[in-house]
Amino acid sequence: MEHVIEFDAAYDQRDKGGGIHGVTIRFVAKEDNKAITFVIYTHWMLPGIDFPGWEPMPADLGYHSPRPMYEGQTSLEDCPYTGGVCYYDGTSLGAQEPFDILRRDGLESLWKYLDETYEDRFCRGGGVSGKVRTQRCHHKL
């Protein structure tokens, strides 16, 4: 299992009719063109933009699959984790648990949680509808 931490820079696009956003941190557990991603919005804004009292928040726990995980699932294009077509789904409420694990137990425990989530989603048939084809995984947790 490959583990990657990605950072997306903060931005201020108000002069272009857009908005502002702080740094985003994405933890990725990936293998065989499939991935589990956990996203945190840090609220670390560009210098000069102040949001007092805003703390980092869990934003998303999701999966990226090259095949649909449930009937009728629509695809996205150009996914960096699948290498092309992607069937993605995620949950903001489900992001609280890995956020708590990271804060309480640290990075290695987070990776273990994401690896187990990968195993549940892709290897044990844990699709949203419960009708996913079970696949054998080639890694060991």
Image (spheres, rainbow, N blue to C red):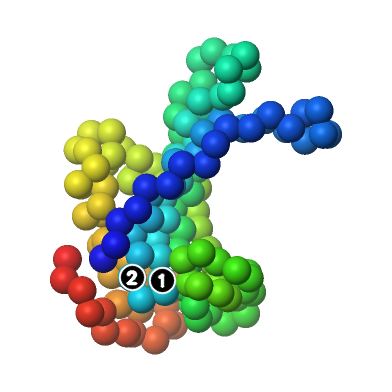
Q: Residue at x 41, y 71 (%)?
A: 34
x and y, in percent, of residue 90 in the image: 50, 58
Residue identified by numbered label 2: 31
Counting the numbered discs, the total is 2
- State the SS at label 2: strand
Q: Which residue is mark 1?
A: 34
Q: Is residue 139 left or right of residue 26?
A: left
> In this rendering, would 106 be left or right of 122?
left
Residue ID at (39%, 61%)? 36
Expressed as whole percent of the image width and height from the top left, the position of residue 129 reads 48, 75
Are there few (<14), some (14-19), or many (20+) residues within 10 Å of tag 1? Answer: many
Quadrant (top left, top right, bottom left, bottom right) of the C terminus: bottom left
Q: Which residue ends up furthest to the left in the rendered image?
A: 140
At label 2, which amino acid type do we have?
Glu
108 displayed left or right of 23: left
Write down the quadrant of residue 119 in the picture: bottom left
Mark 2 and mark 1: span between their CA atoms? 6 Å
Q: Position of residue 56 (x, y in %)?
A: 45, 29
Residue 126 can be seen, yes or no: no
Dot 2 alpha-carbon crowd within 10 angstroms: few under 14, some 14 to 19, many 20 or more: some
The answer to whether the residue labelled 2 contacts the one labelled 1, judged by CB atoms less than 8 Å apart, is yes
What is the three-letter code of the residue carrying label 1?
Lys
Q: Please tell me which residue lies in front, 141 or 98.
A: 141
